[in-house]
Image (spheres, rainbow, N blue to C red):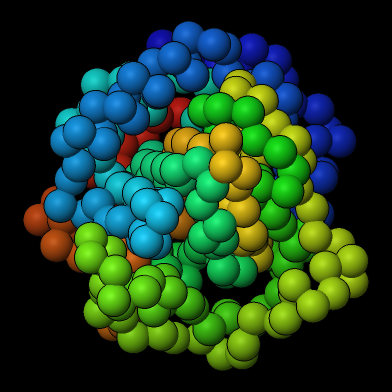
Amino acid sequence: MQPEFKRTLSKAEIATYNTDGVLLIRQAFDPEWIEGLSKGLEHNRGNPTHRARRWYKNEAGHSMFWDSQAWQGVPQYKEFVFKSPAASIAGQLMQAQQVNFFFDAVFVRSPGTQFTTPWHQDEPYWSVDGYDTLTIWMPLVPVTKASALAFVPGSHRTDSVYYQHNFGDLNPDNIDGVDQSDFSSVGQVAIPDIDANPEAYNVTSWDMQPGDCVVFNGRTIHGGSGKLGDEKGLSVFTSKWLGDDAHIKLREVGMDPDHTDCILAAGLNDGDRPGTDLYPEIWRRQ
């Protein structure tokens, strides 16, 4: 039996998601899910995949660890994908007939880290195309508004595909243990200078507790998480979900993470509906 969210999301919540491209849901996940994901993250950090990167490290030892598509090897992640209400939340907000899991990603910043996420959209980096792409961003520890991921409401409705940041360019080359990446940027226009006038863009973020989540469209501009105090680290689990119009798109440049090899190995091709054991269907409207 497919997992369902403990309540039906309201028309107002669905309307906010559609209009703003982002929605905060308080206490969406019970403590058992947070405990399980925290244990899974500890295992993941000790047994990273070949996709893992240390995006940032400075001479003081502050660092940021990232890994993705680890769910097949982390039992707690896999249980969350198949048994948590995450797919139901995604299906209700996208008003989808079916929802497939795309991939997981974790972000771990050590206490005091000041490395912030550049403003960007997600979908242009991904090996899929479609309006119905969605991320659930879950802090596993308390996070203040100033340190949480921030969003530009309504930015998912633009026709522009913005230039993508090569996150590898942000890494200091002279620091040992920091990963670099080969990347060719694509896009139409530059991301506006949101930090110069955040009020003009209605930049939005929230104080959050474990169990809270922010759900946002793959085309919504977001960034800014980080800027931690010396006593505060930040551990975040994210899951990516695909709705009705999402289809495989193998881009010539700019995919990160690049799923090309595993997509082709699964027998999927450009234009296909995501599926197979790689992107399993988790939820279907009753």
State the residue lying farthest toward the front: 60
- Residue 12, horizontal then vertical, whole percent: 86, 36
Task: Identify the residue shown where x is 72% and y is 81%.
Answer: 193
- Location of residue 170 by image quarter: bottom left
Task: Identify the residue shown where x is 34% and y is 19%.
Answer: 39
- For the C terminus, give its image quadrant: top right
State the residue lying farthest toward the left: 265
- Residue 36, horizontal then vertical, whole percent: 39, 16
Residue 203 falls left or right of residue 151: right
- Residue 161, horizontal then vertical, whole percent: 57, 80
Q: Could you tell me how many numbered marks the image carries?
A: 0
- For the N terminus, give its image quadrant: top left
Task: Identify the residue shown where x is 25% and y is 52%.
Answer: 52
- Location of residue 148 by image quarter: top right
Is 143 or 173 nearer to us in this picture? 173
Q: Is residue 100 above or below residue 286?
A: below
Question: Is residue 243 in view from this perspective?
Answer: no
Is 191 or 61 nearer to us in this picture? 61
Is 94 or 126 nearer to us in this picture? 126
Q: Is residue 108 above or below residue 264?
A: above
Question: Is residue 183 in view from this perspective?
Answer: yes
Task: Identify the residue shown where x is 82% and y is 45%.
Answer: 16
- Residue 283, horizontal then vertical, whole percent: 46, 28
